[in-house]
Amino acid sequence: MNIADYMEGLGQRARAASRTMLRASTDDKNRALLAIAEVLDARRPSILEENQRDLEAGRSQGLDAALLDRLELNDARIDGMIEGLRQVAALPDPCGEISDMKFMPSGIQVGKKRVPLGVIGIIYESRPNVTIDAASLCLKSGNATILRGGKEAIHSNQAIARCIEEGLAKTGLPAHAVQVVETVDREAVGALITMTEYVDVVVPRGGKGLIERISRDARVSVIKHLDGICHVYIDEHADARKAHAIALNSKTHRYGVCNAMETLLVHRAIANDVLPALAAAYAEKGVELRGCEATRAILPDISAANDEDWDTEYLAPILAVRVVDSFDEAVTHINTHSSQHTDAIVTESFSLAQRFLTEVDSSSVMINASTRFADGFEYGLGAEIGISTDKIHARGPVGLEGLTSQKWIVLGDGHIRQ
Amino acid sequence: MNIADYMEGLGQRARAASRTMLRASTDDKNRALLAIAEVLDARRPSILEENQRDLEAGRSQGLDAALLDRLELNDARIDGMIEGLRQVAALPDPCGEISDMKFMPSGIQVGKKRVPLGVIGIIYESRPNVTIDAASLCLKSGNATILRGGKEAIHSNQAIARCIEEGLAKTGLPAHAVQVVETVDREAVGALITMTEYVDVVVPRGGKGLIERISRDARVSVIKHLDGICHVYIDEHADARKAHAIALNSKTHRYGVCNAMETLLVHRAIANDVLPALAAAYAEKGVELRGCEATRAILPDISAANDEDWDTEYLAPILAVRVVDSFDEAVTHINTHSSQHTDAIVTESFSLAQRFLTEVDSSSVMINASTRFADGFEYGLGAEIGISTDKIHARGPVGLEGLTSQKWIVLGDGHIRQ
């Protein structure tokens, strides 16, 4: 197979399908999502069989347990995929909304209409459920999709792709609205992220290495999420009880997630009041603390943090702790070391809360709340395709609206420019 | 001078200035804009003197008349720059707006706040007035800016840069909020568009060659405008009088602009009624017509259009004309050949007007109005940094809001995730 030609063919069909998708009604899209759910349910045996092939190949190649776990499908996970499709069908359609219509002095009426982006490429690692997650969000937002999953999941993904195809065929939507890349050749990824004629945006989902590589080589726009180095700053005006609860929850609710706190900043004036109790609570949960000198003066048993710690996303029960002398020092630390994902302050001071909202340059900025709330579901988006740490287009949790754009519409009655 | 180090320094200072700009009040920003206007007014002699140096060098290098004209400054053009600064000062501040605040079931309040993008790089050709235009829009939207103008305008731009510096120094804004690159070395552009750590977005302004080169090599996000291949489609249900006015205005109001019509599509059923009169009107204006076979059956004297014509942005008194058999054929032609800038239909049919709005995938879609209205001022934006033909982030005319982003804000009272 000539990969370049193959990908060009996928791209052309996706572009053509995206034009037809512009006319798809909300009802068409919802019926397609529910039809795919039904087919998935009916085809469980063949999906599980194909998944078994991937798992066996993975075991014989010596994949580690975590990867094999992500690769594995079972009835509960297929139930999850079906439930996800139904939830996306139940969400409001982001497309078609017309806003800001105004008459201009020239007499024309100008406003904006929300429309699909067009063709979205999704590149992800070996988690077959992402195939359905991503396809359903792109379909609901009126886009055509090209999906490229990890090579270890190739048989599972093909089986799911056939279900999607069968579901689409039961409705009026174009058969190529969702296409799954059938080759594991890496050249296919290179083609996908550079076909500016056929692909409008690429969403990479996976480890930092994958995302960095794609961002570097892509010529198509990328909606990406790199690290989550999130901070909680306990201000001198903090309520100690709220501070304790938020600092504990932000770190220990889950460790391997991007919205977990990685560095705790504490104002010197309150450090003695909050750090000992917090250290005890972290110790109980098995969290290792690494502190600056001032922190270690209060908690002599913990190890020293080095410069690297302030820039590390541990994704593990490890926490860097720093005592700061002022609000400004905290904000400077955050704007220097944060990955601009999510940062929170605990304070009762109205003015400092306002300043934190203004001066911290991150995609989610929180007052007196756990960083763990940075999530599409918690923000009421219904679902998310990822969390963007970019500043342009969608920022923070990206839901259906992040997969759309707005075009200008102009209504006249024979108006010409003077 | 080591260019890489020099640009890194500019980048670091811009990033630091962008943090300070986050706290700048609307009043601070407006006072800075007016202060710069005053300095420009006071420094006219030295600006014109430096501009003279550029013009002399340009003449001795044999620059063509059009380029020399764009390069030239005179009192009227300086007046224009001063007036532009005052207009931007009078526009509403896009930053700080909080929207969509909602209580979530968890008890947190979630919403969005409009904020500056951060650091914006502007790369433009040898038109010194762009230095002020771009700087004023970036300043008003709370961003730090690095400006890189064409090498032919280097002395003019340095003189303007000193005015900006002097104006900023009279206010509380950071001195490095606006920096003008002082070297003509091309390597500086390469650095600017790849410094992802210091630059958030790049806006190239100039010819297609410049923009293609920058889009290809940039690792920073680019807000770009490539071609303007705009269409007017005269539907069979068009009002012939409106069709005549719109088709004439879209082509002949100005020729060298991106929102001028380059291809006219006419439904077969109405072609005999509208084409002869239009052809006569175009002939009077000196517009050359190039038609498809069916067009030439009605207008036998015009030359034949070839395949290339449908994909050409003439920017000149030349117009390609094609007769189509149906609405669908017109939409397919547009979605295939349009540069997704601006496309218009002339029709009295409500349903076809609605379908045109839905199915034409361009940044501005118009009903019964001239394509010449696609413009930041005509859309009520007050000013524009450019017209984007991209789909993500800002689409179509980009005003102050297109130079901002939205961050999520979360307000709690000690809320933690369950």
Image (cartoon, coloured by chain):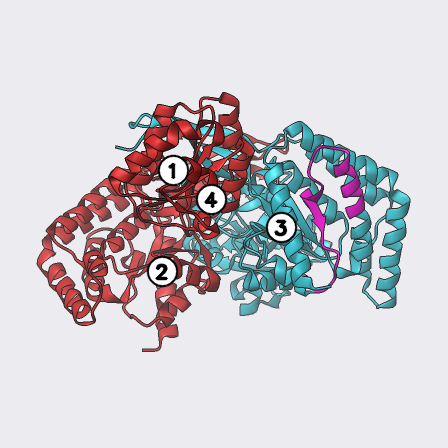
Chain colours: A cyan, B red
Q: Label 4 neighbourhood size at 10 Å, few (<14), some (14-19), many (20+)?
A: many
Q: Which mark is residue B340?
A: 4
> In the rendered structure, which segment of residues is drawn in magenta?
A161-185
Q: Is residue A153 magenta?
A: no
- As measured in the structure, the alpha-carbon distance from the residue carrying label 1 to the one carrying label 4 is 29 Å
Q: Residues within 10 Å of mark 1 (few under 14, many from 20)?
A: some
Callout 1: chain:
B
Q: CA distance from mark 2 to mark 4?
A: 33 Å
Q: Secondary structure at mark 3?
A: helix
- Say if mark 1 contacts mark 3, CB within 8 Å: no
Residue B376, percent from left and from top: 34, 39
* Mark number displayed over residue A12: 3
Q: Chain of mark 3?
A: A
Frontmost residue, B4 versus B60: B60
Q: Amino acid at mark 1?
A: Leu
User: Mark 2 falls on what kind of element?
Assistant: helix
Q: Quadrant of the C terminus of chain A?
A: top left
> Which class describes the residues within 10 Å of circle 3: few (<14), some (14-19), or many (20+)?
some
Residue A313 visible somewhere in the drawing: no
**Relative depth, front residue between B79 and A384:** B79
Callout 2: 10 Å neighbours few (<14), some, many (20+)?
A: many
Amino acid type of the residue tagged 2 in the rendering = Ala
Badge 3 vs badge 2, beta-carbon distance below 8 Å: no
Choose top left, top right, bottom left or bottom right for residue B276. Answer: top left
Q: Amino acid at mark 3?
A: Gln
Q: Which mark is residue B299?
A: 1
Residue B364 location (% of width, % of height): 43, 38
Q: Nearer the viewer, mark 2 or mark 4?
A: 4
Real-space Cα separation, disc 2 to disc 1, in angstroms: 59 Å
- Residue B289: in sight, yes or no? yes
Identify the disc placed on residue B14: 2
